[in-house]
Image (cartoon, rainbow, N blue to C red):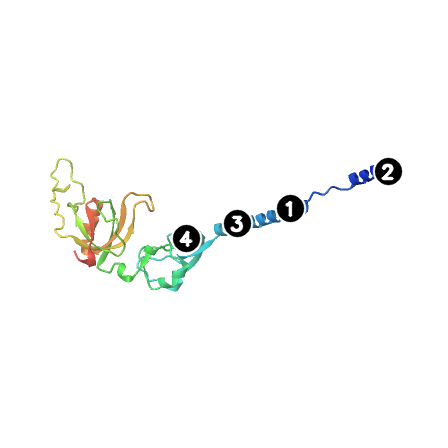
Amino acid sequence: MAATAERTEHKKNEAAAPQRLLGAGPRRWRWLALGAALMALGAAAVAAALGQVDQRSGMVAAAQDLPAGHVLAQDDLQVVEIAGGEEVAAIPAGRLGSLVGQTVQTPIGKNALIAPGDVGTGAEHPNADEAVVGASLAGNQVPSSLQAGAQVALVITVSATIDDQTPSGEDASAGAQGTPAPPPPAEPISARVQTVTPPGEGSGRQATRVELVVDASDAEVVARAASADALTVVEVAGGER
């Protein structure tokens, strides 16, 4: 009886003692450590992503209104910080010093970013005996590889020197007032490309916008031809036709 009571008491003590699962402690700490590592990695990834979103780039902008033909000085330029600057067609701040002494090719407003095509050497800006003519040209009127500074020959395909349209029923060789239209130039006109804007840039137009530097004496003929869609640009090597 005493032995039975002793065994019964021993079993009660065993039942009352806390049960411990083998390996539960170390395994729990391993999971906690893994969770902490994942949280730290996630925080680092978020910080890196936010840093990229807020990344800013220094770009060169005009410190004042700059007219075409103006020679740039240090005081004409400033650096502005913009987000996503690597996707903007503007001159980075690191090149600011190289712009001093260059010539403004097209008017630039105050605080406007300066694009590479907005400035150039003095030779790219028209001289006193030159003029700049703009033309919107179709794909078959201008080489797709044309770039600013290229020497070109301008071919006028039909007469385009009459102010008014020829009235219906009249001789196509006469103007609205009966004045015979002069024939197109027998020889191509030499010119220099000042700027080229490919299709789709700016207003979404389909034509290529080209600014041409020509002799002042040829400016009117070239302008009329461009207006009449009768102008073709041919790129030549070394300025020779």
Q: Position of residue 51 (x, y in %)?
A: 50, 52
For badge 4, the amino acid type reads Glu
- Asked if the residue under mark 2 is in contact with the one under mark 1, i.e. CB atoms within 8 Å, the reply is no
Q: Badge 3: how crowded within 10 Å, few (<14), some, or many (20+)?
A: few
The residue closer to the viewer here, 101 or 96, is 96
Mark closer to the chain start, 4 or 2: 2
Which residue does the numbered mark 2 point to in the structure image? 3
Look at discs 1 and 4 and give the one toward the viewer: 1
Per the rendering, the mark at residue 45 is 3
Q: Residue at 39% across / 61% down in the picture? A: 96
Alpha-carbon distance for marks 1 and 4? Answer: 49 Å
Mark closer to the chain start, 3 or 1: 1
Mark closer to the chain start, 1 or 4: 1
Look at discs 3 and 1 and give the one toward the viewer: 1
Which residue does the numbered mark 1 point to in the structure image? 27
- Indicate whether 194 appears above or below 200: below
**Secondary structure of the residue carrying numbered label 3:** helix
For badge 3, the amino acid type reads Ala
Which residue does the numbered mark 4 point to in the structure image? 86
Mark closer to the chain start, 2 or 3: 2
The residue closer to the viewer here, 126 or 82, is 82
Q: Badge 1: how crowded within 10 Å, few (<14), some, or many (20+)?
A: few
Look at discs 2 and 3 and give the one toward the viewer: 2
Q: Position of residue 34 (x, y in %)?
A: 60, 48
For badge 1, the amino acid type reads Arg
